[in-house]
Image: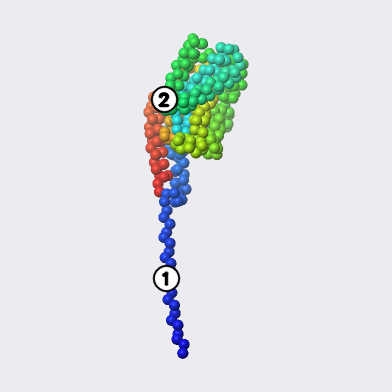
Amino acid sequence: MSQATAPAASSPSPPAPPAAQKDGRTVERSLGRRLLARPEVGALIAAIGVYVFFFAVAPSFREAGSLATVLYQASVMGIMALPVALLMIGGEFDLSAGVAVTTSALTAAILSFQLTVNVWTGVFVALIVSLAVGAFNGWLLIRTGLPSFLVTLGSFLILQGSNLAVTKIFTGNVASDSIADMDGFDQAKSLFASEVTIGGVDFKITIFYWLAFAAIATWLLLRTKFGNWIFAVGGSQDSARAVGVPVNFTKVALFMGVGAGAWFVGMHLLFSFNTVQSNEGVGNEFLYIIAAVIGGCLLTGGYGSAIGPVIGAFIFGMVNQGIVYANWNPDWFKAFLGVMLLIAALVNLWVRRQATRR
């Protein structure tokens, strides 16, 4: 008689694998967090606040002609703020940027007038001089290892003294001679200092150059190998060199970029006013840096964008003209700008903390 076989005991099911632990590297951030991670977001918030404020307190600020004036002020500042911002992302400063603009304009004006040549000769020589000043700053920084603050402070003093001394030697006063009646002036003016009429409102051509340069700088930073080099050099110079980044070339190129910006703005000023004061530009280097910082660039390098300085320069233009349109004492401009700088720095700090929270 066969014996019934007892059913086999069912084997226990294997334990479920533990849930994967998520850390800050694997957690997918929300759209809001990704937007906050952009360097220019804090500046955009500040710009909206400034615009709404002056729109409310200054009725003339709302007119189209006023907007053209604001944009013009912003463009002259913003064209220089762009290369200064790229240099800051690369971890360096240029305190000679303000007087370099005047040096460029004086070179073109004095050379053209004294040699009685076509003004385009002066324009091209001024470009060479401006690029040489930038290259010298970068070369001296690399050769000596001194901080860029000290190197460019020395350049600032050299250029400031040379601007005044050379101008007095050739003209006998502190301003260059007028070149308005010289060959090539009208053509150069149409390129550097003309106006474009849109809807009955005259817009300075520098506004369009400013936006075009911002687009080029954005493409350079985000879509080219050189842009990667800029961020790498600003983040850690030694690490960048260890992975093959040409640190010296990048730094010299960034300083020469500031020189190119100084040349362009100098040509605009020269062909807008026909003459140049040798003591102009002192202090503007801080305004360029302020525009870059308000736009999200860090003083320590390695972080920033090209759009941020555009917004920072726009804030400068709004404050500069908004105070006038509001009929306030213009002596308050620097105080207002200082407050804006501190607020923007705090907003940028808050935005970055929110963006990096897990």
Residue 202 is drawn in which quadrant? top right
In the image, residue 108 lies at what x, y percent? 55, 18
Q: Assign a secondary structure to mark 1.
A: loop
Q: Is residue 170 at least partly visible in the picture?
A: yes
Q: Residue at x 61, y 21 (%)?
A: 187
Across the whole image, how many numbered discs are drawn on residues?
A: 2
Question: Which is in the foreground here, disc 1 or disc 2?
Answer: 1
Q: Is residue 328 at least partly visible in the picture?
A: no
- Give left or right: position of 193 versus 331: right
- Give left or right: position of 171 versus 341: right
Q: Residue at x 56, y 12 (%)?
A: 114
Between 133 and 209, the one lying in front of the other is 133
Q: Assign a secondary structure to mark 2.
A: helix
In the image, residue 177 lies at what x, y percent? 53, 13
How many residues crowd around disc 2 within 10 Å: few (fewer than 14), some, or many (20 or more)? Answer: some
Separation of residues labelled 1 and 2 (CA atoms):
74 Å
How many residues crowd around disc 1 within 10 Å: few (fewer than 14), some, or many (20 or more)? Answer: few
Ranked by sequence position, the earlier of labels 1 and 2 is 1
The relative height of residue 59 versus residue 121 in the rendered view (above or below) is below
Q: State the residue position of label 1.
A: 12
Indicate the amino acid at tag 2: Leu
Indicate the amino acid at tag 1: Pro
What colour scheme does the image use? Answer: rainbow
In the image, residue 357 lies at what x, y percent? 40, 46
Q: Residue at x 42, y 23 (%)?
A: 153
- The circle drawn on residue 150 is 2
In the image, residue 321 lies at what x, y percent? 45, 28
The relative height of residue 343 versus residue 282 in the rendered view (above or below) is below
Q: Tell me whether circle 1 and circle 2 mark residues in contact (CB < 8 Å).
A: no
Between 287 and 22, the one lying in front of the other is 22
